[in-house]
Amino acid sequence: DGGITQSPKYLFRKEGQNVTLSCEQNLNHDAMYWYRQDPGQGLRLIYYSQIVNDFQKGDIAEGYSVSREKKESFPLTVTSAQKNPTAFYLCASSGTSGSSIDTQYFGPGTRLTVL
Amino acid sequence: EDKVVQSPLSLVVHEGDTVTLNCSYEVTNFRSLLWYKQEKKAPTFLFMLTSSGIEKKSGRLSSILDKKELFSILNITATQTGDSAVYLCAVENEDGGSQGNLIFGKGTKLSVKP
């Protein structure tokens, strides 16, 4: 079954620690995205990658970092510089480079709580 | 397992047509249902529905939720080419305490021809 997996579902970290969220897809999609969702707000784009070894900042990239060394993997690191890291993080992928409208498929999400 | 199913997966109409997009769900501890419009990058928020039978409207778009039958519809009247997009339905559950988690459907890709 093709799809997107995110792990873990729930993650707890102490303030000041970096944490990496996993996102893997076996859909052979070129583009991958990271979003953050907070209560009462829509999805906000953190980073996206249109192709391996390339990525761009989204609207709220400060305090986050990503890598795209493999087509199927797009891990997100929440650094200690992120002021409000507690949130629900969603990863998505789509089939093209993003230049046209292509459905984004979302993973199940990771809820990060920083204590 | 929680799931959200949207139909149809794709739809082609002509300007001026009215379209109805469907979203059905099976979610434990339902909190809300959300509709998003996705064009090139981040989806933009359209509606949040929490109560059955209350229609929400924004211009030519409207949506309603049926919590008994577990579905929602999104209507777009007098469609325009700018309505071409993927429309995503997501359901928020109460798993996770005070902050719910989102489960997305696969989207309906709408193409509006001039």
Image (cartoon, grey):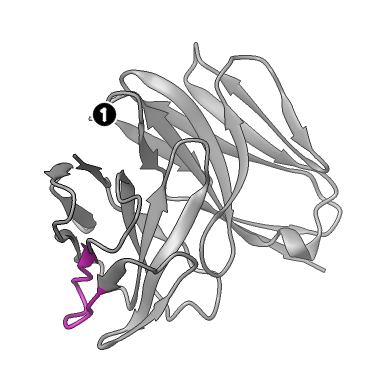
SS assignment at label 1: loop
Question: What quarter of the picture does the C terminus of chain A occupy?
Answer: top left
Which quadrant would residue A86 be assigned to in this image? top left
Mark 1, Cα crowd under 10 Å, few <14 / some 14-19 / many 20+, is few
Left or right placement of residue B11 versus residue A1 in this view: right
Location of residue A76 in the rendering, given as x and y in whole percent from the top left corner: 23, 65
Q: Who's the residue at 22% across and 61% down the image?
A: A80
Residue A102 to residue B57: above or below: below
Q: Who's the residue at 13% across and 57% down the image?
A: A17
Q: Is residue A62 magenta?
A: no
Q: Mark 1 points at which residue?
A: B96
Question: What quarter of the picture does the N terminus of chain A occupy?
Answer: bottom left
Query: Which range of residues does the magenta coloring cover?
Result: A66-78
Residue B63 to residue A100: above or below: above
Q: Does the magenta stretch include residue A74?
A: yes
Location of residue B22 in the rendering, given as x and y in whole percent from the top left corner: 56, 36
Q: A59 or B48, which lies in front?
A: A59
Q: What kind of secondary structure does the magenta stretch mostly adopt?
A: loop
Q: B75 or B41, which lies in front?
A: B41
Q: Who's the residue at 43% across and 33% down the image?
A: B91
Left or right placement of residue B94 versus residue B78 in this view: left
Left or right placement of residue B96 versus residue B45 in this view: left
Location of residue A20 in the rendering, given as x and y in whole percent from the top left corner: 15, 61
Work out which residue is located at the far top of the displayed protein and give it. B68
Left or right placement of residue A79 versus residue B55 in this view: left
User: Which chain hosts label 1?
Assistant: B
Hey, what amino acid is under mark 1? Gly
Which quadrant would residue A21 be assigned to in this image? bottom left
Location of residue B5 in the rendering, given as x and y in whole percent from the top left corner: 42, 38
